[in-house]
Image: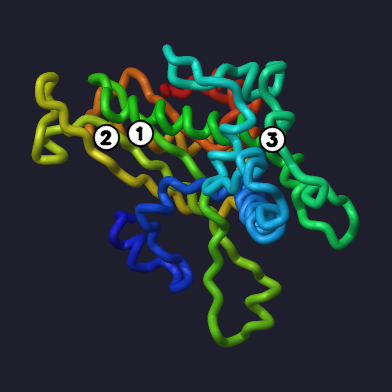
Amino acid sequence: MNQRTFERLKPYFVRSARPKDRVTCCCRYHVEARSLFSKTMEFRKKYTIPNILDFEQNLYPVYEHLTDIAVATLYDKDQVNNSYSKACLDRECSKCGLSLLKFTDEELNVSDDASNVSWERELLDKFAGHQFRAQWKNAQLKCLKENLLPNHCIIIHDYSENYGCKEKFELQQTYFQRTEVSIHVSVIYRHAILEVDGVESLPDIPCSITEHFFVISPDEKHDQFFTQKVQTLVKEYLDSIRYDVKVIHEFTDGCPVQYKSRNWNVNRHLFQTRI
């Protein structure tokens, strides 16, 4: 199935991604932290700032973005690598931590009718590491895409939610059947091939091609065997277009069962997958 057919047959409730959606993390950690951050700053702006003296307002700033308050809990960046050290992100540095943030007594109230500032503090304890590791990985991906070497390619793997097709008649029967399929999406970045793409990527004039590889299967278990099969299919596709790939840079999500488990690595070794 090509990409245009896949997009045309998608359900009505699936919306196309906007440019801002592609740079937004939708993990549970970010969603919870973003919601609490909004309520915390709203509480500070409404109740804290009007009740403190002018010279104290610098101690209790109203942060505009979630990243700003995460940066406030970290020490200075490494000027050479332009990044924070691992010790700072893991809260092992004595100069970093939540002690750098100042909260009023009203914000630290733990009664039932109090705001969620205390919960926000708990999330911020590990949020900085989560946030800046995600930014670092994104920077590595951009760097690889801009400097993709010959015979190299980049593949981003991710599962979509299981999809099911239901008729508007016989709803009861459809409910008990629960027929669904798994959709696995792989985004491939590679150099252009003259016979396939109509343009050739040259060392002096590189030309990158972006492709979307969809795998639709009745197997609803998103385990290491499914991912092993997907990688095999992707490699077979690259061989079919005669793309002589030597190194594949793979980016996946944080699920340890799929691409990062020891079982997956054992399977790759035993079956001698050419990846």
Q: Position of residue 171 (x, y in %)?
A: 63, 83
State the residue position of label 2.
240
Q: Amino acid at mark 1?
A: Glu
Relative side of 274 to 119, left or right: left
Q: Position of residue 186 (x, y in %)?
A: 41, 42
Q: CA distance from mark 3 to mark 2?
A: 57 Å
Is residue 221 visible in this depiction of the protein? no
Q: Residues within 10 Å of mark 2 (few under 14, many from 20)?
A: few
**Viewer-closest of 131 and 272:** 131
Is 151 located above or below residue 69 in the figure?
above
Using the rendered image of the protein, determine whether residue 171 is visible from the camera's viewpoint: yes
The numbered mark at residue 236 is 1
CB of mark 1 within 8 Å of CB of mark 2?
Answer: yes
Q: Residue at x 44, y 29 (%)?
A: 250
Circle 2: residue type: Ser
Residue at 57% in and 32% down: 71
Please tell me which residue lies in front, 120 or 140. 120
Which SS class for mark 1? helix
Q: Earlier in the sequence, mark 3 or mark 2?
A: 3
Foreground disc of the pair 3, 2:
3
Residue in the picture at 35% in, 62% down: 7
Earlier sequence position, callout 3 versus callout 1:
3
